[in-house]
Amino acid sequence: MKTRCLIVDDEPLAIQLLKAHVEQVSLLELTDTCDNALDAFEVLKSKPVDLLFLDIQMPMLTGVEFLKSLPNPPRVIFTTAYRDYAMEGYELNIVDYLLKPITFERFFKAINKYLELTRSTVPLPQPSELAVPKQDEPHIYINVNKKHHRVLFKDILYIESLKDYLKLHLTEGSLVTKEKISEFMEKLPDGFLRIHRSYIVNQRHITAFTATDIEIGRMEIPIGGNYKMEVMDRLK
């Protein structure tokens, strides 16, 4: 039986990252995502949830306040950018406390803690059942000050040209490398789209678009006039 997960976070990029992590583990199943505690309360009333990934700092109702209000909460893993809440979280008997940005390795440790806590009713997975990141996942090496960083294509949100340099905005952080955008575009697989003389976006991370710009999370990226027709054709 799969563990049914609910992600509650007011940051779209944080939700996307956690969704990607959940999809890596075959024993996990994403029930829903919410950007506030009130919507999460409605989901918990209508759908079975085994494990709750709960952001602490949210509008209207914090994750701590929300958890305290639940009479029979599921198992909870707190996610936050602030270390100060760790002690209070553990006093609430949570499974784990993940500090953003959350790496897959740290996420996987938290899942193992959850499985240990529930092992009396949920069998521990065999290594073959866990979809850990594969070494042959499509990737590229980025040269930063003579050090070559391995970057998965799926982790690139968008690429920004800074004259003779490129800034790669990633699901976790960013990298700056010396290369021209036109040359770099040739190295990218299908799914990447040049939308401006200074921008390339990863289509899998687009959250919304208009005739003039593309949104990736909270970032609005302009569509250049010379690229508009091709961009609209690709996205529609």
Image (tube, rainbow, N blue to C red):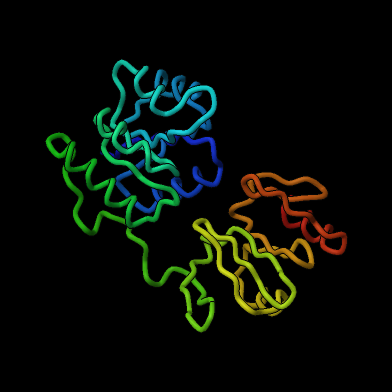
| Residue 146 against residue 122 in the figure, above or below | below
Q: In the image, what residue occupies the spot 28% across and 46% down? A: 110
Residue 176 placement, left or right of 62: right
Q: In the image, what residue occupies the spot 28% across and 55% down? A: 130
Q: How far across and down, in percent of the image, does residue 226 sit?
A: 86, 64
Q: In the image, what residue occupies the spot 38% across and 43% down? A: 83
For the question of whether residue 32 can be seen, the reply is: no
- Closer-to-camera residue (228/117): 117
Q: How far across and down, in percent of the image, does residue 224 sit?
A: 83, 60
For the question of whether residue 92 can be seen, the reply is: yes
Question: Most extreme residue toward the front, as rendered?
Answer: 84
Q: In the image, what residue occupies the spot 43% across and 48% down? A: 100
Residue 212 placement, left or right of 122: right
Q: How far across and down, in percent of the image, does residue 207 sit?
A: 64, 45
Residue 94 placement, left or right of 231: left
Question: Most extreme residue toward the bottom, as rendered?
Answer: 146
Q: Quadrant of residue 195?
A: bottom right
| Residue 42 against residue 50 in the figure, above or below | above
Residue 231 placement, left or right of 36: right
| Quadrant, the N terminus | top left
Q: Quadrant of residue 96?
A: top left
Q: How far across and down, in percent of the image, does residue 136 sit?
A: 40, 72
| Number of on-image labels | 0
- Closer-to-camera residue (82/32): 82
Question: Most extreme residue toward the left, as rendered?
Answer: 120
